[in-house]
Amino acid sequence: MIAGIGFRKAATMASVLDALERAGAKGCRRLALPQDKLGQPAALALCNAGYLLLAIPAHAISGQPTLSDGAASRSARGTGSVAEACALAAAGAGARLAGPRSISGDRMATAALAVTGDIR
């Protein structure tokens, strides 16, 4: 499994971890996120805490079919959910979402789990 994450600039690592827990991804150490978010404080904190961050380029996010359809995500990234699109892109061909994205309690981060095509 791999988790995709999306977050606002002001999000903290706690925001992302809360979204991961709500998505059923507590303990998942491989996180996919938009490439342009790698330098953000939340991403740096996750990296320093030992999470493996997988940068997903914009072209791999745009157009990904997602279960959720947020207007802000659609407008900014060309997909209904950044977290879901990143998870699918990182998991590869044949991947499927374990469920729709979850939103952190502070509404600063989202997370979604994808299962690779090899797992049944």
Image: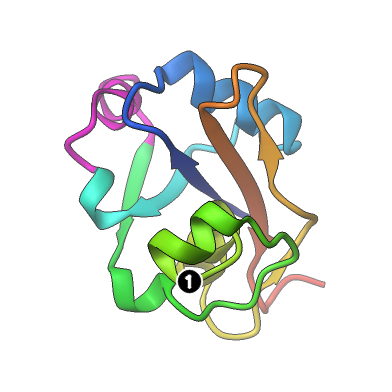
Residue farthest to the left? 39
Tell whether 15 sits left or right of 45.
Answer: right
Residue 69 colored in magenta in the image = no
Determine whether the residue tagged by mark 1 lies in a helix, strand or loop: helix
Callout 1 amino acid: Ala
Q: Nearer the viewer, residue 23 or 28?
A: 23
Q: Can you give x and y, in whole percent of width and height, for residue 26 in the image?
A: 66, 29
Residue 45 colored in magenta in the image = yes
Q: Can you give x and y, in whole percent of width and height, for residue 14 in the image?
A: 49, 14
Residue displayed at 53% across by 65% down: 85
Q: Is residue 68 shown above or below 66?
A: above
Q: Nearer the viewer, residue 108 or 46?
A: 108
The magenta segment: 38-51
Tell whether 7 sits left or right of 4.
Answer: left
- How dense is the environment of label 1, judged by Cα within 10 Å: few (below 14), some, or many (20 and up)? many
Q: Kindly indicate the quadrant of the structure image that contains residue 100.
A: bottom right
